[in-house]
Image: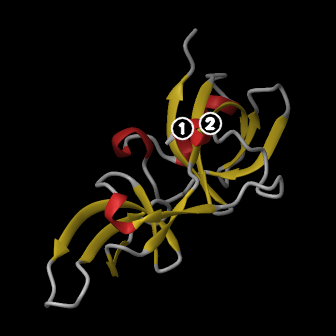
Amino acid sequence: MGDDDHNDFETSGSGASATYPMQCSALRKNGYVVLKGRPCKITEMSTSKTGKHGHAKVHLVGTDIFTNKKLEDISPSTHNMDVPNVTRTEYTVISCDQDGYLGLMTPDGGTKDDVKLDPNAGYNNDTLRVSDIFQAIEQDGKEYLVTVINAMGEEAVVGIKEAPK
């Protein structure tokens, strides 16, 4: 990988592209790839040998990192596939409204208020709902940290935990 491993770009407008090419044969299980235009985590990979003059084909199965939908694709092993630049950032939660919109403090001390908890998702093994988080923050004064995953212009909360005292 090399020096490209520090993907701490603030916006995609800073010359950072949303994806980068990687040869299909270099992709690995649990890595990321773009399948059918969606950023996915690779769950299965298999390579098939083809006829005398054909190329080996790679069959990729992955889950969309935002919707958890299963997607698959087949590509010649010598072709390039797009790999999404995926970043994970931890923020301190300042506020939460009843719809699940979070007020967040960024690592550099700024604020961010465009991230929404998924009302259908249960966080921390499905025990924590938006209403619980709203109550804990707004009424009980608890502090939380959220992990936000960002790829291809989309972002979503993938984890939430109580802040250490």
Position of residue 62 in the picture relative to residue 135 (left or right): left
Where in the figure is residue 63, as x and y percent of width and height? 37, 65
Per the rendering, the mark at residue 126 is none
Position of residue 107 in the picture relative to residue 156 (left or right): right
Q: Residue furthest top?
A: 165
> In front: mark 1 or mark 2?
1
Q: Quadrant of the C terminus?
A: top right
The amino acid marked with disc number 1 is Gly
Residue 46 vertical placement versus 150 (above, below)? below
Q: How is the image coloured?
A: secondary structure
Local crowd size for mark 1, using a 10 Å CA cut-off: few (<14), some (14–19), many (≥20):
few
Depth check, front residue: 115 or 29: 29
Q: Quadrant of residue 104?
A: top right
Q: Secondary structure at mark 1?
A: helix
Q: Residue furthest front?
A: 53
Where in the figure is residue 143, as x and y percent of width and height? 63, 23
Where in the figure is residue 70, as x and y percent of width and height? 33, 72
Q: Which residue is mark 1?
A: 2
Position of residue 4 in the picture relative to residue 11 (left or right): left
The amino acid marked with disc number 2 is His
